[in-house]
Amino acid sequence: MTIDLIFTVITYVVLVIFLGGFLYKIWLYATTPAPLKIPTTPAPTSAIGVSGRLASEVIFFKSLFKGNKWIWLGGYLLHVAFFLLILRHLRYFMDPIPEILIILQQAGIYGGMFLLVPILYLAYRRFMVDRVRYISAFGDFFILFLLLSIVLSGIGLKYFYRTNIMDVKMFIMGILTFHPAKFPDSGLFIVHYSLILFFLVYFPFSKLMHSGGIFFSPTLNQIDNPREKRHSIS
Amino acid sequence: MADPTNIPELKDRIEIPKLVEGATSHYKCHPAKEKHLTPLGFPGSRPDDWHDIAITRLGELLKESKSLKVFMDICVKCGACTDKCHYYLGTKDPKNMPVARQDLLRKVYRKYYTLSGKIFGKLAGAEALTEDVLKDWYTYFYQCSECRRCSVFCPYGIDTAEVTMAAREIMHSIGIGQKYTLEIIDKVETTGNNLGIPEGALVGTLEVLEEEIEEETGVKVKIPLDQKGSDILLITPSADVFSEPHIFSLMGYAKVFHQAGVSWTLSSYASEFANFGLFIGGQEHLQKVAQRIADIAREFKVKRIIVGECGHAWRVGYSYWNTLIGPFDFLDPDYKTPTHICEYTNGLIEQGAIKLDKEANDEYVVTMHDSCNVARASRMGDKPGGQFDIPRALIDASCNHHVEMDPNTTKEKTFCCGGGGGLLSEEIIDLRVQGAMPRATSLKQVMDSHGVNFMAMICAICKAQFSTVLPYYDIPRDIVGGIHQLVSNAIQLGTNKV
């Protein structure tokens, strides 16, 4: 067996676990009944209003902002930087590369490096604030460590041990088009890539499910209209 | 009642305490005995295979309740809730931090119902249900008043109340319960009210109240009981009939109805608005307690149901009645079911149907305590936030002097009184006093800065709790009163009759 074949097979297995696990969890959240009306009020009285409420949580972390400005700042920077970093990597997944991604490329690179700041800040909080330390389990530190490793190996690939990015793109496009290609010949890339695969496998089994789960939180997604419209189990 | 041994000192502002592990591990509610458990359909004692039964029940709940399923999975331990619970702020016990309280159940969920927990155990935050864990459950799930303050600040809206209710439900399935709440549920299910008052006593008390109103105002105001065919059925917490200061609000409702010239009645069969079924999770008892109200409304052929000042019961009435005991197709569709007495009175004021003399309350500088279930689990009127605006409109219509407490402690951010969720029980007076610390602190601020001497509220539990615990902070108990107590003082009887 060659390394090309091994990584091709592992990648497909990981994608099945990630997508299957994520969708299975979402299916569970969606189909579990919500017997009673429990929106946290004041709550919107229409479906459009609820969409707005969810959007304000997903896009701006509104409740967290009310709750704690420092956690909000750390968490918000983490997510924005992570988002830019994802955008910046989309170029390996599409051909031709859309104009907008080329424009955002530089922002993505800075975002990726900047990601170190909120990761370290949130880790610092977990160690230093007694209340947060008390509630932190191994997994809460582990995910920060995993992200840190991914970012550091990425920075290494970009600036110190450059790999041939055309090889990377060939391999990924090969995966996406079901025409397996050669795995890039770079030790650090193996590390970076393996960490990302691990991240994806870990995703559906961890608190990372907050990403999909928030949309099914009854306190946020229910309409405040129990007197006007009889709620039945749904 | 035994006096509390540990009364926090009120500071200038609410301080976030350093953790004191185990600070309240010895505060325990009296456990329910067989005679409290079996009438409600729970096992009378803990069976030998309690562990398996509890785990099975947890599995069932995960399939029955979206909130529990989602909340168990998606907490990221960000810490935003850690300083939001009045019991944590008052007791310093880390297990009273909302996320830590949830984790008492979440770690068991992880152990038995997640792959990572099964494989990695403690590393994945999983822990088996042991005798010690069960002990923690009983202790700390009865130190949560289900007030939802944590859910306001949670980025995912995780509501610890839902977790607490589930944990209490699981404990009931293995014959573990809290005496106070279960005793009350049994009483209301068998006698029609939480206090177990028979019809005769009700009649006598209402007559005394009518006499008092007449003595005070010179006007004959009726408080009708069991008047079939009345237009309005008033459902109010039984405390409104038998406790102070609750009783003054009942007189207020009576004066409002009198002045509006409508026909209304109380019911001796459904003489309770409170519904402690809410506190124990599940819908069986929630539904059973509420059902008496729908039944009597049908029998009396009333047009509408109006409800009195009670926080958790307003949540049940507003959010759950339609689902549990509706549809209300036998009532007049022109009215909302239920209608809160504050919505009703406010409507009359807006129409000019009743007149209020604000000077009657000139001795008071009033502030408003928002009760948790009204603030965060219901609404009044047509607009979100009506639950804040309408009671305040009544204060402003009845009083000249109204000041607000620190906005971080009112409206959706209001602090629980410390006695909700089934915790208004004597043996945990220490917990209740400490849990009231945040509210007492912000109240003291406006007492000192503005001379506040009346804290108005619309919840029977808040009234009872504050009347008991505020004196330990050297705040006089008569500072506590109802919104309709103020209306009662100010309403002009005999004028402007419609």
Image (spheres, rainbow, N blue to C red):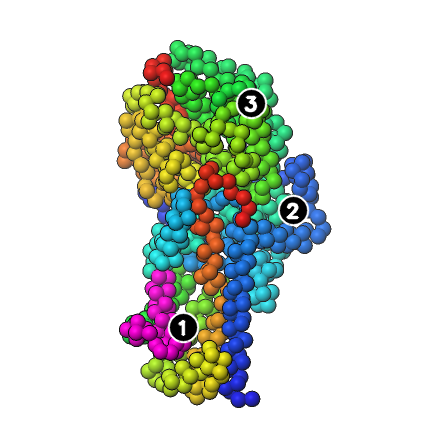
* Foreground tag (1 vs 3): 3
Residue B65: % across, % down = 56, 50
- Residue found 53% across the figure and 85% down from its top: A5
Q: Which residues are magenta?
A: A75-103
Q: Which residue is mark 3?
A: B300
- Residue B136 colored magenta? no
Can the viewer see residue A138? Answer: no
Tag shown at residue A148: 1
| Cα–Cα span, label 1 and label 3 | 68 Å
Question: Residue at 29% across / 21% down in the picture?
Answer: B359
Q: Is residue A98 magenta?
A: yes
Asked whether the viewer can see residue A18, the reply is yes
Q: Residue furthest right?
A: B48
The subunit carrying tag 2 is B
**Residue positioned 35% across, 78% down in the render:** A96
Q: Residue at x 42, y 58 (%)?
A: B78
* Residue hosting label 2: B173
Q: Please state which amino acid type lies under the numbered disc 2.
A: Ser
